[in-house]
Image (cartoon, helix red, strand yellow):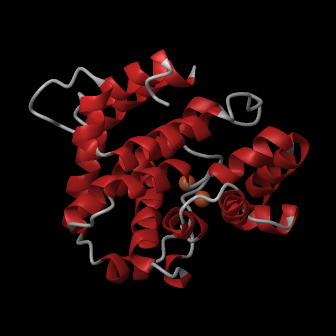
Amino acid sequence: MVSRSASLSLLLLKLVNSSYYGFASHIDTISRAVTMIGIKEVSDLVMGIEIMHFFDKIPGDLIDVNTFRRHSLACGLLSRILAAHKGLQHTERLFLSGLLHDVGRLVWYRYFAEQAKMVLYMAQKTGLALYEVEKECLGISHEEIAGYLFRKWHLPFGLENNIVYHHDPISAPNPVEAGIVHMADIAVNALGLGHSGEHIIPHFDSKAWDLTAIAPGTLFTAILQTNEQLDAMEALLAEEWH
Ligand SMILES: [Fe+2]
Ligand SMILES: [Fe+2]
């Protein structure tokens, strides 16, 4: 599938040769890239990048799509790096989970623009977090929309777990991974690395420290590593997404 698309092939080659993977030797063919990172990882990465494509036409007066993508990408990178620090196996799944964690919100920005305007306005007016207001105004949260989409698209449950519970990791069947995405989301919000419409930092569940067993010092190191990768990764994906 990747080989049939020149732009995806180029993107994949740039990715595998970037600091994101940090391989010592240069990789110049798709088949070599697949050998190095695995067919599952390649297909997952392509899927995540393609899903973000569906939402190119977000009305600019609601949210700048680049700001949204920066938030998503930063959360993906930090989730992946935290997972690597913990020695988890499925670090790509954590990247994808972070990348897509607020994808449910894109659905209402894209397809329910009038309601989205009202929700954004209500969050500003009440001073409450957007994720609290949206459930009240729309009757459904962005996590529930994502869960519905993921089941409809038959995406792996691991992904659904991390995304549906990213604001409430303690309730997740796999609380460790959901806790990592939760921690990463709050950190990138606090650091102002893009945003997905939130005007305040969402509530951080302090139980996430125990759930993930990630020390504050590790989070700090992971944030520095995310900062090192973010601009390069953003520039790389910007060519694909525009
Ligand atoms: Fe969220
Ligand atoms: Fe978020």
**At x 69% / y 53%, what residue is drawn?**
104
Q: Position of residue 193 (x, y in %)?
A: 45, 42
Task: Look at the picture and state if 235 lies above or below 172.
Answer: above
Q: Position of residue 201 (x, y in %)?
A: 54, 58
**At x 73% / y 32%, what residue is drawn?**
58
In the picture, measured across the screen, residue 149 lies left or right of residue 89, that is: right
Marks counted in the figure total 0
**At x 56% / y 63%, what residue is drawn?**
163
Task: Look at the picture and state if 217 lies above or below 207.
Answer: above
**At x 32% / y 27%, what residue is drawn?**
30
Task: Look at the picture and state if 4 lies above or below 96.
Answer: above
Q: Quadrant of ligand 1?
A: bottom right
192 and 114: which is toward the camera? 114
Observer able to see residue 129: no
101 and 5: which is toward the camera? 5
Task: Look at the picture and state if 220 lies above or below 50.
Answer: below
Q: Quadrant of residue 15?
A: top left
